[in-house]
Amino acid sequence: MSRYLLKPKAGTDVISVVVGWDRPLQTFFAQVFTPTEEEPEEGEATIWLGTEPGELPTPEAAIAVVAPYAEIPEALAADLDADMGASIGVKDGAHQAEAKRGLFGSLH
């Protein structure tokens, strides 16, 4: 799994923005955190995509989710693509495979 913390755009109420690659789910993910009354400094993920297998299939899909809220480094898509490429051929461990079968009915 990879995880990149991005700088929020000025003028937004966004606390933090995260994108990355989740090898077990075979998807990129995108999260945008905004303050809440209960968590004014850490915030809550008000946008969180990439929690289902294959939901965000490309780096560009994840970046499109967060682009309105964060500054996007020029190399981000290439870095995310490299993270995915580095995980090709990595297999689930026994416990991870069992959890996937229980959650999704298959190993994906």
Image (cartoon, rainbow, N blue to C red):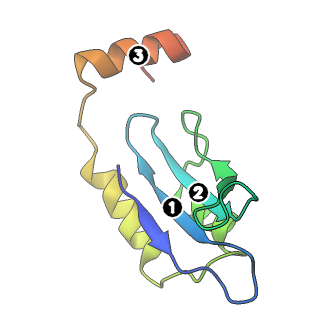
**Which one is nearer the viewer's eye here, 106 or 3?**
3
Query: Tag count in the figure?
Result: 3
Mark on residue 33? none
Q: Is residue 94 above or below residue 60?
A: above
Label 2 near label 3: C-beta < 8 Å? no
Relative to 104, 94 lies left or right = left
Residue 94 appears left or right of 2: left
Q: Tell me the crowding category of disc 2: few under 14, some 14 to 19, or many 20 or more residues within 10 angstroms, Cα based.
A: many
Residue 20, how many percent across, how many down?
45, 57
Question: Relative to 36, is 99 on the left or the right?
Answer: left
Taking the spot 65% from the left edge, 68% from the top edge, the residue there is: 66
| CA gap, disc 1 and disc 3 | 24 Å
Q: Residue at x 37, y 41 (%)?
A: 23
* CA separation in Å, label 3 and label 2: 23 Å
Element assignment for label 1: strand
Comes first in the chain, label 2 or label 1:
1
**Mark sitting on residue 30:** 2
Assess whether mark 3 and mark 1 are in contact (beta carbons under 8 angstroms): no
Residue 59: x and y in percent read 51, 61
Q: Tell me the CA gap for discs 2 and 1.
A: 4 Å
What residue is disc 1 on?
A: 19
- For badge 3, the amino acid type reads Ala
Instruction: Please give the name of the residue rendered at 58% of the width and 45% of the height, measured from the top-left corner.
Output: 50
78 above or below 47?
Answer: below
Q: Amino acid at mark 1?
A: Val
